[in-house]
Image (cartoon, helix red, strand yellow):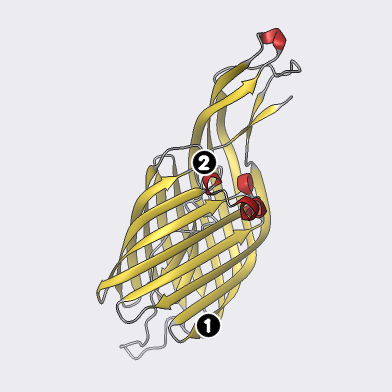
Amino acid sequence: MRRHRLRGCGLASAIAAASVVAPAVTPSSVDRAWGQPAPQPAPSWAATVIAAPAESDPSGLAPFWREVWTGADATSRNWLLYSGVTIAPWSGIHDTGWRLRFAAGYGQYRTDGTARHLVAAGAGGGTVDVAYRSRGQIAYGDVLVGYLWRLGALTAKAFVGASIIDHRTLVAEQSATVLGPNGIPFGLEVALEGGEVGLKTALELWLNLGSNAWSSLDLNWTSAHETYSARLRAAWRAWPTVSLGVEGILNGNGQQTLGRFASDLELGQLERRAGLFLRYEWFGGEVSLAGGLSVSPGDSARPYATLNWITQF
């Protein structure tokens, strides 16, 4: 039976696997799942979470070496909840040294559209447009090891490890049964289905631009469902504890593999986001809110929102 390959957008990563949401700050970046498109997830979601460094502990106690984060990402077609922890086993959480990271998330997404089919002559011939819709869920988990470098105004982190991403279709239906040119009915096939375990890599850069501005770049890729994401941020410190900024995000997965994207650079095949964010920080924690417009393949622009909270201890 020939099948129509369902295309659409909902969650990821994020995921990359969790791969692009978040607060913005300094040296400590954590991955999320991003609001990944669906069947592209927003992890890669994927999301990345960055926590601001504390240069010194005014209490005089030992430096923080654990960081926990949790958050939510949503559009009108999908939602994702995520959480994780980063551990600096032999140093402070903002100091040069090794890192261990564990993250997980769960979300649901829906997609719909119209597919044009060339029908069999015995069924009237010509073409017919068939409406389709689906609803699915995504779950993911990451186990990563990495290293943090402090290089003057630049803080860099690199991670490598394993990621598991599981896509499950809850509902998949189309408005009509259509016979193909060979007389065999077209069926509905969801683009991403089932669980995959794969290699994951992440690169997270933070650059201080004087005392009142900063920028960050987060890149994530995993072979699990070929999920990847990129997020670029730039911010201005309106007050010592408050940052205002802009962000741009790209999320992709197996529907448009990284190799295919690199060869034709067709942005229309990826989930694209552009928005603003507000971040408030205090000693040992932060909360941030981001929002803007998200455009997925074959879909119109829709609002998105991301809320993220981090604590260090």
Q: CA distance from mark 2 to mark 1?
A: 37 Å
Q: Quadrant of the N terminus?
A: top right
Q: Which residue is mark 1?
A: 149
**180 or 38, which lies in front?**
180
Element type at mark 2:
loop
Residue at 51%, 70% (x, y): give it: 204
Element type at mark 1:
strand
Q: Residues within 10 Å of mark 2 (few under 14, many from 20)?
A: some
Q: Which of the 4 image quadrants contains residue 235?
A: bottom left
Residue 85 position in % (x across, y down):
49, 68
Q: Which residue is mark 2?
A: 297
Residue 84 position in % (x across, y down):
49, 64
Residue 121 position in % (x across, y down):
71, 11
Name which residue type carries label 1.
Trp
User: In this picture, is 284 found above or below 12?
Assistant: below
The extreme right residue here reads 182
Name which residue type carries label 2.
Pro
| Residue 133 horizontal side relative to residue 214, left or right | right
Q: Quadrant of the C terminus?
A: bottom left
